[in-house]
Image (tube, grey):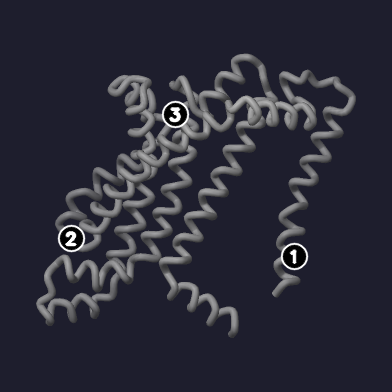
Amino acid sequence: MYAEKIRKIVLGMVIPIIVIIAWVAVTANGDIPSGILPKISQVWDTGKEMVATGRLQSDLVVSFGRVVKGYLIAVILGVVLGSLMGMFRTVEELFTPVITVIRQIPIIAWIPLIILWCGIGEVSKVVIIVIAAFFPILVNTESGIASTPAGYIEVARLYNLHPWSTFTNVYLPHAIPQILVGLKLGLGVSWMAVVASEMIAATAGIGYRMSDARSLMQADVVIVCMIIVGLVGVLMDKILGYLFWIVTPWQRNTKKEKSTK
C-alpha cells in the first residue's frame, strides 16, 4: 500500500521536474527576453516580493470573496432546481430544452453581455460565477435525484409520505454522492470563471493582476499568478473533498471494503 503511494508521488513529480529542467536550460544563456520567459530565480524573487508587499494576499482575498458569493448562490439555485427536475417530470420537461441550449454557450461568451447589463463592478463578477457553477451542480443534482430506485419511491407513496419527507428520506440520501460531485465541479469552475472575468473587466483580483502584468510585459508576475491560481484551485478541491469525506461516512466504509477485497 505504501509502495503504491510512493510510486504515485514519484510518477507525479516526473513531468514537473522535466518542465523545470527544460525551463532552466532554455533561459540559462539569456537569449530569451525576461518579458517573454523569465528565469526561475526571477519568478521566485517576484513571488516573494508580491507576498512581502501584500499584493498577492489582497488579490486572493478579493477573488475568493467573489467566488464564495457566486458559488453559494449557484449551489442554492442548482440544488433546488435540479431536485425539482429530478423529482417531477413536468418540471424536467419544462426546463430541459432551455437549459440544454444555454449550457452550450461558453462562459466567456457571457462576459460581454453581463458587463453591458451589470457594468464592471462586483455584481458582474458574481453573476458570471453563478452562471459558470450553476450548470454542473444542476446536472449532477438532477442525475442523482432521477436515478433514485423506483421501488424506494413506491414505498414512500405507500406510506403516504409528505413530498418534503420523501425528498429528505428517499431522494436525498441516494443522490448525495452525485450532488457532491456537482458541488466539487462547480467550485472548480467558479475559480476559473472569476479569474477569467477579472482578466477582462476588473480593478482588483488575481485575474486583474495577471492582465495588468501582461500589458506591462511582466511575465514573471503572470507566471507567479498562474502558479498561485493552480495551487489555490487544488487546495480548494482538496478541502471540499475532505469535507465531503467527513459528511459521507458510508462512502468511506464502501472504499475500505473494496480495498480489502
Residue 247 or 211: which is nearer the viewer?
247
Residue 32, above or below 90: above
Alpha carbon of mark 1 to alpha carbon of mark 3: how far? Answer: 39 Å
Q: Which residue is mark 1?
A: 6
Q: Which residue is mark 3?
A: 197
Asked if the residue under mark 3 is in contact with the one under mark 1, i.e. CB atoms within 8 Å, the reply is no
Give the x, y percent position of residue 135: 35, 47
Give the x, y percent position of residue 156: 17, 77
What's under tag 1, amino acid-wise? Ile
Task: Locate the C terminus by quadrant.
Answer: bottom right
Q: Residue at x 38, y 63 (%)?
A: 178
Give the x, y percent position of residue 104: 37, 41
Asked if the residue under mark 2 is in contact with the one under mark 3, i.e. CB atoms within 8 Å, the reply is no
Residue 257 or 69: which is nearer the viewer?
69
Task: Locate the N terminus by quadrant.
Answer: bottom right
Mark 3 or 2: in front is 3
Residue reaching furthest to the top = 216
What's under tag 2, amino acid-wise? Arg
Element at badge 2? Answer: helix
Residue 182, above or below 259: above
Of callouts 1 and 2, the N-terminal one: 1
Q: Which residue is mark 2?
A: 89
Residue 32, above or below 153: above
Q: Residue at x 71, y 62 (%)?
A: 8
What's under tag 3, amino acid-wise? Ser
Say whether residue 195 is visible: yes
Say whether residue 104 is visible: no
Alpha carbon of mark 1 to alpha carbon of mark 2: how far? Answer: 49 Å
